[in-house]
Each structure stands twice: as C-alpha cells, then as structure tokens.
C-alpha cells in the first residue's frame, strides 16, 4: 500500500439477522473483492464449529469459492484447527487450492478446537489432540514440499506446492513454535489481547531462520471500525459491542438474549469480560483509525496488521474496508 506495513483482513463470515448463511457467504465474496480493489495483502477465514453466527466452518471450501470470484488477492485459513484433521487431508485440500490458484493460497494453522467441548466429541477429537499440533505442522511441511521419497505417503495434489504455513496463536505456545520452526506468526489480539506483547517477544527471541523465512514476520490482529465520521463510528461500535455481548452470553442457553437484554448486561461483569476481549480495536473516522493503527504498529513492531471489521451490516463492513485502505495509503503526516 505505502511504506506503512501491509494491511490484511480476517473475515469472520458473520451470519446476520437477514440473508442467512448464503448471505454471509456472498458477503465474503464482496469483502474479498473490495479488499482486492483496495490493495489489502490477504484475506483469511477461520474454522469454527457449531456456531450459528459464523459461516466459515469449512475454510478450504470457502477459499475456493472466493478465489473463483477474485483475481489476485491472497486467500487463506486463519486458521485451520489442525488437530481436528489429518495433516495429509489438509495438504491435499490446500495443495488442490494452490494448483487452481497459484501463488494465492496461505495455510494458517491453529491448535484450538474452534468450538466447545461437546462439539469437540462430534469432531472425533480428544482433549489430548492439541499435543499433536507441533508434529502436524512439521508433517505438513514435508507433505507440501518435495523431499519425501516417492515410495512414502505423499499428498497428491500437494507435493511440491510449498503452500506457505503460518502459526496462529493467542498464547506463548504458538509464539514459541513459530519461532523455533522459522514460520510467520499471527497473534489473535482481536479477541485475546492479554499475551500480545509477551508472545511477540518470545517469537522474536526464539526465531530461527528457515528455508521459508529469513527473519521474523509478526502479524497482529486488530478490530477496525471505520466510518465517514467519528459519530457514526461510535454508533457502530455500540452496535458491535451489544451484539458481541449478546452472542457470547447466549452460548449454551436454549434461547438467545435479545438486543435489549444484552444492552442491560454491558456494565455487568459478564458483559465487561466480553468487551475486554475487544481492547485491541481502532475506531473512528479514517484519519483517527490510521493514527490508532500506527500507534499499534509502533507499540508491537508488527510487520503486518490483519484487520477484522465486525460491523453488523455488509454495507458498513465494506465501507470500513474501503475507508481504512484509502486512509492507509495516504502519505503519512509530516507534522
């Protein structure tokens, strides 16, 4: 974009009150097309399960759909929860994507289940599955490379595609693994900001250059709510906060909270706990958001920012994506 660090997008594939799942998936295409036109580096989709508000339970399928409706922007998982899957199957899926869309596919990897404990059982995953994550990441590197003997189990498609791997995390574990393996590291500070700085420090201190990466590449996730005016941005932030509290506090309840009930919980400890997850948020008119993003880069040393635009409506989300990019490419102030 400019001399500023690149901007990317984490699309949460949010299912709104109108349009349903199909509307959410169509929205992913629209966001990616706007991101491509605006100069964002990549768009990622996260694996979640048994969540009615999120439509990205099958990232590889969603990536294929969006890739067919865009031309050049990188697309990937942010991430695939690897212990839910066989590394061979993931290598085949993303190898297929890489063959169909050369130079455009990323493979972000996480070790969480992306769901609750009951759904975890439906995935046929045990609570010990996370322990296989480091070996799974290494195995994927072999399957996507070309160093395995032809007589070994290979991924077809997949072999030789060298799809870039990224480690995702919200704790020191992922930071340490990414550092030791010499892979890029993306921290989920858009919802789990507490360990952001310690994790980045650990990643950089342990980083060992690899064939894939010569120096550390740290991606910091941030919520972004950009609107034409500060007043409109404040209104959108209030909507996002109310909806976030409603969704989280409703988990496990037979009936979801209403917007009015969620409003009453904003100052309650349960509501405050949810809102604390959004501490890393840039909100305001375009110039204000740019200043906040620049401050975040200076504070963290991020090499890239991946922005989540959690607006309730697609139109507001597209506006935020566009306005943020337009302001980010403007020359930095010399005052």
Image (tube, rainbow, N blue to C red):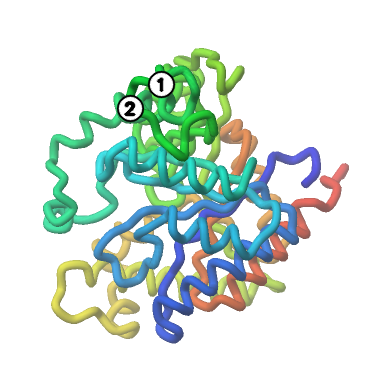
Circles 1 and 2, Cβ within 8 Å, touching? The answer is no
Residue 253 versus residue 141 in the image, above or below: below
Q: What residue is shown with label 1?
A: 150
Q: Nearer the viewer, residue 233 or 24?
A: 24
Horizontal and vertical percent position of residue 235:
55, 77
The residue that appears at 42% across and 17% down in the rendered structure is: 180
Q: Is residue 125 left or right of residue 54?
A: left
Residue situated furthest front in the rendering = 151
Report the disc number at residue 89.
none
Can I make out residue 287 in this image? no
Q: Nearer the viewer, residue 259 or 45?
A: 45
Horizontal and vertical percent position of residue 21:
40, 76
Can I make out residue 32 in this image? yes
Horizontal and vertical percent position of residue 216:
56, 23
Residue 122 versus residue 208 in the image, above or below: below
Q: Nearer the viewer, residue 259 or 123?
A: 123
Q: Is residue 127 left or right of residue 134?
A: left
Q: Check disc 1 and report its element: helix, strand or loop.
A: loop
Q: Check disc 2 and report its element: helix, strand or loop.
A: loop
Q: Is residue 106 left or right of residue 199?
A: right
The residue that appears at 56% across and 44% down in the rendered structure is: 99
The residue that appears at 43% across and 69% down in the rendered structure is: 14
Q: Is residue 290 left or right of residue 246?
A: right
Q: How many marks?
A: 2
Report the disc number at residue 153.
2
Residue 174 versus residue 114 in the image, above or below: above
The residue that appears at 46% across and 48% down in the rendered structure is: 77
């Amino acid at each position: 974009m400019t001399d500023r660090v690149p901007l990317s997008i984490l699309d949460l594939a949010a299912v709104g009150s109108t349009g349903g799942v199909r509307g959410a998936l169509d929205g992913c295409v629209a966001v990616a097309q706007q991101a491509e036109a605006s100069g964002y580096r990549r768009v990622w989709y996260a694996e979640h399960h048994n969540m009615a508000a999120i439509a990205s339970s099958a990232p590889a399928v969603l990536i294929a759909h969006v890739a067919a409706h865009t031309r050049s922007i990188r697309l990937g998982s942010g991430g695939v929860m690897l212990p839910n899957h066989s590394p061979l199957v993931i290598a085949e899926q993303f190898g297929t994507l890489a063959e169909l869309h050369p130079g455009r596919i990323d493979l972000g990897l996480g070790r969480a289940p992306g769901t609750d404990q009951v759904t975890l059982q439906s995935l046929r995953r045990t609570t010990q599955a996370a322990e296989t994550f480091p070996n799974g990441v290494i195995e994927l590197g072999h399957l996507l490379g070309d160093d395995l003997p032809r007589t070994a189990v290979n991924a077809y498609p997949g072999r030789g595609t060298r799809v870039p791997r990224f480690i995702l995390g919200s704790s020191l574990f992922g930071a340490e693994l990414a550092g030791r393996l010499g892979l890029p590291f993306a921290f989920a500070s858009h919802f789990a900001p507490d360990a952001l700085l310690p994790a980045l420090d650990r990643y950089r201190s342990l980083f060992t250059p690899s064939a894939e990466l010569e120096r550390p590449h740290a991606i910091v996730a941030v919520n972004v709510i950009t609107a034409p005016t500060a007043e409109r941005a404040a209104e959108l932030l209030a909507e996002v906060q109310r909806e976030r509290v409603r969704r989280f506090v409703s988990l496990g309840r037979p009936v979801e909270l209403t917007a009015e009930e969620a409003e009453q919980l904003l100052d309650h400890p349960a509501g405050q706990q949810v809102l604390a997850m959004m501490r890393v948020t840039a909100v305001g008119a375009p110039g204000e958001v740019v200043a906040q993003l620049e401050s975040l880069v200076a504070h963290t040393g991020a090499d890239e920012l991946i922005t989540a635009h959690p607006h309730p409506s697609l139109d507001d989300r597209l506006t935020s994506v566009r306005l943020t990019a337009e302001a980010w490419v403007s020359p930095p102030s010399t005052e």
